[in-house]
Image: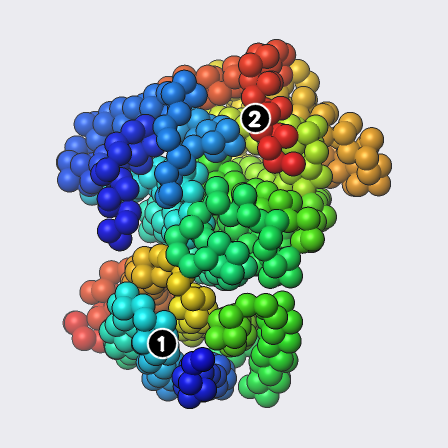
Amino acid sequence: MIHPLVYDIAHLLAGGMVLVSFMLLYQDRMHGLLNVFAFHAFILSLSVAWEALIQHAPHLFITAGIALVVKAIIIPVALHRIVRRLNIHRSVETVVGIGPTMLAGMGLVALSTALMLRVTAEADPLARQDLAFALSVVLLGLLMMVSRRNAVSQVVGLMSIENGLILAATGAKGMPLVVEISVAFSVLVAFIVIGIFLFRIRERFDTVDVQALDRFRGERQ
Amino acid sequence: MTLLETNFLADFDATSAILLIPLFSALVLALLPGYRLTSVLNVLASLLTLLVALSLFVARPEQGRLLFVDDLNVVFIALNTLVGFTTSLFSASYIAHELETGRLTPTYVRFYHAMYQAMMFGMNLALLANNIGLLWVAVELATLTTVLMVGIYRTHEALEAAWKYFILGSVGIALALFGTILVYVASQPVIGEGLDAMTWTILIERAAAFDPALLNVAFVFLLLGYGTKVGLAPVHAWLPDAHAEGPTPISAVLSGLLLNVALYAVLRFKMLMTANEAALAPGPLMVTMGLTSLIFAAFMLYRRRDIKRMFAYSSIEHMGIITFAFGMGGPLANFAGLLHMTMHSLTKSAIFFAVGNIAQAKGTQKIADIRGLTESHPVLGWGLVIGVAAIAGLPPLGIFMSEFLLVSSTFAREPLLAVLLVLGLLIGFGALLLRLSGLAFGAPQGSLAPVKASYVPMFAHLLLVLGAGIYLPPPLVAWFQHVARLLG
């Protein structure tokens, strides 16, 4: 019999991710959004590390480390720089208002909990709650992607979806290839950040030439 | 990681060769300068992969825990490497022209060839994977490499298309991963923890004991996720842009191969679902998505102004037909689906070869600016006419046969669905012939520059399609019938 505290901590961390997903939904400043995302990734790494401990699966520490270093530090820092450089930090354009988005988010969490708890009646209880939380995080990330117009916030939405998936993968006891999958995801995320950089410059100044960008900002005469 | 490495190195056989040749060539091509050398090497590597893939029919390597060859995927692999080879031939002459006109620089060409082989590696890995996690990683790899190729011209439109493809593709594969995790959660109590619970050959044997409710939810995620990559409506939005803005050889490979690879993934999971009696029947879901795609794309064909975009919609239409066929299931419809998939791959890539040459000769992709091709460029023009006639489903070409089989078998089982199917087919048929008459006949318009590219790949494909329409060799029929029974 596993100590109830073990469950409670796993529960707390996974539930924390859902809460932070909600926080992502109502951010209206770009830097705030990125900070909350870094926090999201940080909780993910704690949650994965906890799973590694209680499942006695040391390889999951690698996944936790990747989440911490890449997603909670490197990516947010890089995106902060891009945002500052492209001067787009003022506000996040939303398609729908914050209120309706939050309500829709609550509906999605209710839906995913109702669905996952019903279909996983026979699965391992730890995996069960993790899946319900993970699906909530995934759906909230999707909601964020459709309710934002800006490329950076869409990417943050996509990365929060990925965080949810890593949570689900680590919660499924003894799932093989989790480390490989999280590495594959990191590659994907790296591409996204490079892509955003090229794309945003293009969109605003109609060229990918960084010198031209400097000219537009009046730094070169 | 280590598992992968030991498996690759421990037993070197045909399966690993199909993966190692493209992987190694990708590395070499990234290092070598000079487009002449690299394009020849690209062709050679693709030919070598094709030869090894064909050897699978004769001598089948032992099934491993990560990679395996069975009667189903051997068909996909042969088709994949064949079209990969002919497209590399076409791409060699196409790229030479792009260099002359300055649309691509030598550095980009080097990158292009390396990515071409990396993409072939990703697709072959997806087809050979015996592990559903590995399958997912491979599809992601193929997505990433094609995203880079779509954006290679770096025009505003190309970057936008690549971005759209990237975001939608990522959401798609994210959903597919969630489905994959759910399959593991369903199989873990039955098979136990570890690699076995994700190994497809073991999954299919034990699938009957899995929790059906979990499998149902998993399949919905997998169908939506991999369905995005198949280009099924309503999650098809990336497909026309990606086809229109990338280099034409890539459009040919996207339509001819990548969509099939994603469909293959859907089929594997469909087989899992059918193996579990209590689970939801996957057929109706696939039939609905297939029919929606078919009818939607057929209507969209009328309003196209860009020639590559038009054939991209035609690909959505045909993937819809194929998904419909596999959704109907049963030996006859599955047979039609397999045949249609093969014929569509060959025909659509032949059409894209023709379109690539046309766009280079005319200097435009706008349908309105291209007229009277049969007069200005007779060989090319008639090649396009045959290709479009084939894709529209005119007899005696191969697609007519598969469509006829599908329609007649559907009429026997579900007359109402057959009416919808025929309606979609006819609408698409009308649109294609309407556009074709403008493109191919009438007074020539625009540039009359001669085409320097080779016609061999295009006519090789068209000959195969014509041949299959007139006479299907009995061994091929027997093989397809056998695979159709496997698909259930």
Image side of residue A163 versus residue A210, left or right: right
Residue sitting at x 67%, y 21%: B401
State the residue in front, A179 or B249: A179
Q: Position of residue B230 (x, y in %)?
A: 54, 46
Dot 1: within a 10 Å radius of its alpha carbon, few (fewer than 14), some, or many (20 or more) residues?
Answer: few
Which residue, given by chain and number where applicable, does mark 1 sit on?
A54
Q: Local crowd at mark 2 within 10 Å, few (<14), some, or many (≥20)?
A: many
In this rendering, would B414 be left or right of B245? right
Give residue B343's mark. 2
Question: Of the residues shown, which amino acid type is indicated by label 1?
Answer: Ile
Of residue B60 and residue B87, the one placed in the foreground of this image is B60
User: Residue B16: which quarter of the image?
Assistant: top left
Residue at 60%, 77% (x, y): give it. Answer: A113
Q: How many marks?
A: 2
> What is the quadrant of residue B456 in the picture?
top left
Q: Residue at x 43, y 66 (%)?
A: A173
Does dot 2 land on a helix, a strand or a loop?
helix
Q: Is residue B458 above or below residue B302?
A: above
Which quadrant of the structure image shows residue A166?
bottom left
Chain bearing mark 2: B
* Residue B274 visible in the current orientation: yes
Q: Position of residue B484 (x, y in %)?
A: 62, 30
In depth, the one of B472 and A112 nearer the eye is: A112
In the rendering, at what x and y percent does residue A74 appear? 24, 73
Q: Nearer the viewer, residue B163 or A161?
A: A161
Q: Is residue A46 left or right of residue B204?
A: left
